[in-house]
Amino acid sequence: MNASQNPAKPTVPPGTKPNPLGSRLPPRKALGLFALLFLVNYLLMRFLFPGEQPVTVPYTEFRQQVAAGNVTALYSRGTTIEGRFKQPVTWPTPEEVKQAGQPPRPTTLDRRLLPPPRTSAYFNTELPAFFDRGLEDFLIRHGVEISAVPIQQGGLWTTLLYFGPALLIIGFYVWMYRRAAQGGGVGGMGGMFGIGRSKAKRYDAGDPANRITFNDVAGIDEAEAELVEIVDFLKAPDKYTRLGGTAPKGVLLIGSPGTGKTLLAKAVAGEAGVPFFSMSAAEFVEMIVGVGAARVRDLFKQARESAPAIIFIDEIDAIGRARGGIAFGGGHSEQEQTLQQILTEMDGFSGREGIIVLAATNTPDVLDRALLRPGRFDRRVVVNLPDKAGREAILRVHVRKVPLAGDVRLEELAQATPGFSGADLQNLVNEAALLAARRNEAAVAHKDFLDALEKIVLGPERPLLLSPQDRERIAYHEGGHAILGLVVPGADPVHRVSIVPRGQALGVTYQRPQTDRYNYPEAYLRARIIGMLGGRAAEEVVYGTRTTGAENDIEQATQLARSMVTRWGMSDAVGMVQLAPRENRFLGTAAGVGGDKPFSEQTAALVDAEVQRIIQGCHEEAQRRLREHRPALDALVRALLNQETLSEEEILRVTGLPPAPQLEGAPLRQGT
Ligand SMILES: Nc1ncnc2c1ncn2[C@@H]1O[C@H](COP(=O)(O)OP(=O)(O)OP(=O)(O)O)[C@@H](O)[C@H]1O
Ligand SMILES: [Zn+2]
């Protein structure tokens, strides 16, 4: 289970001002007016020219009309004949409808039925597949004019009338354009409905109340340090360019979601005291081609007017994907144009203007090379997930505005939250504060944090009606995980066991590392697998039967064992061979064996056999140790059935076991 879920984020950053250049007519209204005109146009057409839509008649009917002398002219195109009747004709005729045995008004749903009757002076028909030899003679005999050009539907006056409504719409456009242009004073695409205007959020650093500085950023010191130079440059651009050096133009911030890229960009603006224009790249790209480019132009224009300034483009991968790569529905060329416009704007800077473009992405490897060339986003700053000290510092930033009870131990919380991003930690503080408020507490206590953490990691409690047998089985399952966490050397300390159903889980065992770990001993990994298999092993030892409850455990254990074999060279039979790709550093996704296997079938079989051998060994050890500690297991289960959730001290007390000898910690794990 992944600990970092989407944290709730404030949608509008503090200090955001609405764009002062809003279009005068609200876009909603303009659209409504537009739709109305369209409707009027359509109705007008239908009303004025009810017969102008040609009827489609069968070939036999066409011949009959020619024979009756009712066809004046025709034009043929391929096997289609279009023409004009002397007298308008209704098709299908009432007799036809009767013959077909249909109600006079067939529904459009039934395609086998005849079309609804229509009257028109114009018609079209399909020539039969076989050649009608006498047709030409036949037509001439009946005085049909064979036209070389398509037959005009209606004369000059109808043509004019056709154009009337269209002219009306064009007139409306011009009028709207003028209005908007007068109001906003921005020409070009930007004038019309404000479509081409960037919806950039301007965040002004001038107001000290909502000024964000490096003080608000914690735990990502390296990234911060790299941006200090940018702040310097913005404060005194001339200092850098005086000797002919080129100023930085673009910085790419790379990091997982919620690591504080946006925050960092804002802090740079705040530190330098310059305005901050931010926009998400996804907002650039809309349905209408050309709009994205216009928005880019407008964004840069706004920034230039208030230079020195920072432009922040979030999720730049939305437009900056390598061209010719993944095709984007219909929006491909739009995306390309938008990207091109950004490049053009950046190339256009003299560097002395004091504008720096910061862009953020969490998938740097998909970006177009053109973006990364010198003079563009040639500086890259990696924003990593915070380590334990970093997490504590971030928590400290976010609890500033929260009254804390004396028992809160931020260090412990930092220890229990490996893999959490800054945004996740902010969310944790927020959830804890909400929980404390709901509990009518005067300050936020440590327990509030722990409960909030549990809710974030596993989802809210889920009321489930369980039979006493099911509850007992779940208690033994969790008890199995917990006991092994206590008795297997090297296992992470167990700090909470619960049989309250949450999210997908029926029960949870939390294990907490002592410190963040970057290098894992083999013994530790084995201890982890043994613990993971402990739930099933306990069920087997106690009941002698199995349930589906171990699915998640099996999945995790298999993944870990596979990594031991394919990535970390921990199988003697396979040896020190890398058989699986490295995990993605930025996304933190642990990759299993790749889809397109770069190794042979034999190797694959060997890997599978080795994975099985590891799992089997761990499974046996889990069963053996649980048999050995059966009294402790029973005691733990009794306490769990009584109290549902046990803390670390309670677990140690009821089982009478000492904590497992430590190898040194590793990230927080919860087994389910
Ligand atoms: N290093 C940090 N220090 C303090 N707060 C942080 C940190 N990182 C993130 N946060 C908090 O999380 C919130 C969201 O972070 P932010 O929007 O900057 O992340 P991001 O990396 O831009 O995410 P995304 O990639 O999803 O846009 C911030 O407003 C801030 O409150
Ligand atoms: Zn389990």
Image: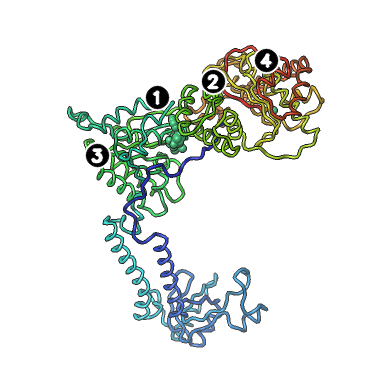
Q: Say whether disc 1 or disc 3 marks the residue closer to the N-terminus.
A: 1
- For label 3, the crowd category at 10 Å Cα-Cα, with few meaning under 14, some 14 to 19 and many 20 or more, is some
Q: Distance between the residues labelled 4 and 2?
A: 29 Å
- Residue nearest the observer in this picture, 130 or 117: 117
The residues tagged by marks 1 and 3 sit, at their Cα atoms, a distance apart of 30 Å
- Residue at 37% in and 78% down: 161
Image quarter in which the N terminus is found: top right
Residue 607 position by quadrant: top right
**Helix, strand or loop at disc 3?**
loop
Residue under the point 66% across and 14% down: 659
| Residue 578 numbered mark, or none | 2
Amino acid marked by disc 2: Gln
Q: Position of residue 28 (x, y in %)?
A: 42, 60
Q: Is residue 255 visible?
A: no
Measured as percent of width and height from the top left, residue 57 is found at 54, 77
Q: Earlier in the sequence, mark 3 or mark 4?
A: 3
Asked if residue 85 is positioned above or below residue 631 in the image, the reply reads below
Q: Distance between the residues labelled 2 and 3?
A: 46 Å
Q: In this rendering, would 606 be left or right of 515? A: right
Residue 268 in which image quadrant = top left
Q: Find disc 4 in the rendering and name its residue.
A: 488
Give the residue pinned by disc 3. 349
Q: Nearer the viewer, mark 1 or mark 3?
A: 1
Q: How far apart are marks 1 and 2 (CA)?
A: 33 Å
Residue at which label 1 appears: 221
Q: Quadrant of residue 406?
A: top right
| Left or right: 230 as drawn, with respect to 434 | left
Vertical placement of 219 versus 337: above or below?
above
